[in-house]
């Protein structure tokens, strides 16, 4: 039996695997992202996996809210719940997201970024929280290192239209 979400996830033929292998080596040009240019410039380290995944992801907030999460666990830094409570609420919701891209994205990120092959749920949440956060505490998971690791060449951010682009200018001048 084929493993679920292994390295060949969604690749059903030799041709698909060859095309993916070729594309996987190419640089990434991200034309629409929600990364903060300030956090990139400062080379910020993620606080924890809840901050990394949930601080600004309205898709995850919507799924959590639709599955009964308290509003205090949403809206990133504006929410009043602890980061652990936010992460646990997301982990508890995920089983209801099968068929939603959030489910696949979450598992693929755990595998390809953290090397964690467990399915995220209430039972695995604490172990995944501990392992992911231990990795996030290293320099390998700072903003710029991750951008390098994934061969990202262009990032187009979705700044506020009134932004003075100060951080973009600082980044452009930074070697």
Image (tube, rainbow, N blue to C red):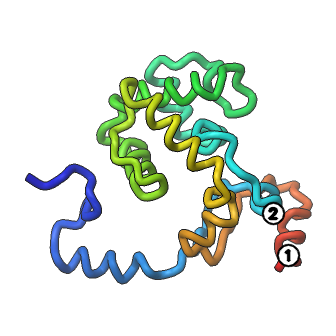
Residue displayed at 13% across by 55% down: 2
Among the 4 quarters of the image, the one containing residue 58: top right
Tag 2 secondary structure? helix
Tag 1 secondary structure? loop
Badge 2: how crowded within 10 Å, few (<14), some, or many (20+)? some
Apparent side of residue 128 relative to residue 72 in the rendered image (left or right): left
Residue 88: x %, y % from top left: 50, 25
Apparent side of residue 132 relative to residue 14 in the rendered image (left or right): right
Question: Which disc number belongs to residue 41?
Answer: 2
Residue 81 in the image: above or below residue 149: above
- Of mark 2 and mark 1, the one earlier in the sequence is 2
Residue displayed at 47% across by 24% down: 66
Residue 84: x %, y % from top left: 58, 26
Residue displayed at 81% across by 63% down: 41
Residue 115 in the image: above or below residue 75: below
Q: Are marks 2 and 1 in contact (CB under 8 Å)?
A: yes
Apparent side of residue 34 relative to residue 17 in the rendered image (left or right): right
Residue displayed at 65% across by 47% down: 137
Please state the total of marks drawn on the protein image: 2
Question: Which disc number belongs to residue 141?
Answer: none
Question: Which disc number belongs to residue 174?
Answer: 1
Residue 148 in the image: above or below residue 116: below
The quadrant of the rendering that contains the C terminus is bottom right
């Amino acid at each position: 039996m084929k493993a679920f979400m292994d390295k060949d996830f969604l690749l059903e033929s030799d041709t698909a695997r060859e095309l993916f292998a070729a594309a996987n080596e190419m640089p990434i040009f991200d034309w629409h992202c929600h990364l903060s240019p300030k956090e990139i410039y400062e080379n910020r380290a993620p606080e924890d996996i809840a901050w990394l995944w949930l601080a600004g992801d309205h898709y995850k907030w919507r799924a959590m809210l639709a599955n009964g999460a308290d509003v205090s666990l949403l809206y990133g830094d504006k929410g009043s719940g602890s980061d652990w409570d936010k992460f646990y609420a997301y982990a508890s919701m995920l089983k209801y997201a099968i068929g939603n891209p959030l489910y696949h994205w979450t598992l693929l990120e755990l595998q390809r970024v953290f090397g964690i092959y467990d399915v995220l749920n209430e039972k695995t949440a604490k172990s995944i929280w501990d392992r992911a956060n231990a990795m996030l505490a290293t320099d390998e998971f700072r903003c710029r290192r991750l951008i390098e690791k994934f061969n990202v060449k262009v990032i187009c951010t979705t700044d506020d239209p009134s932004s003075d682009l100060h951080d973009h200018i600082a980044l452009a001048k930074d070697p």
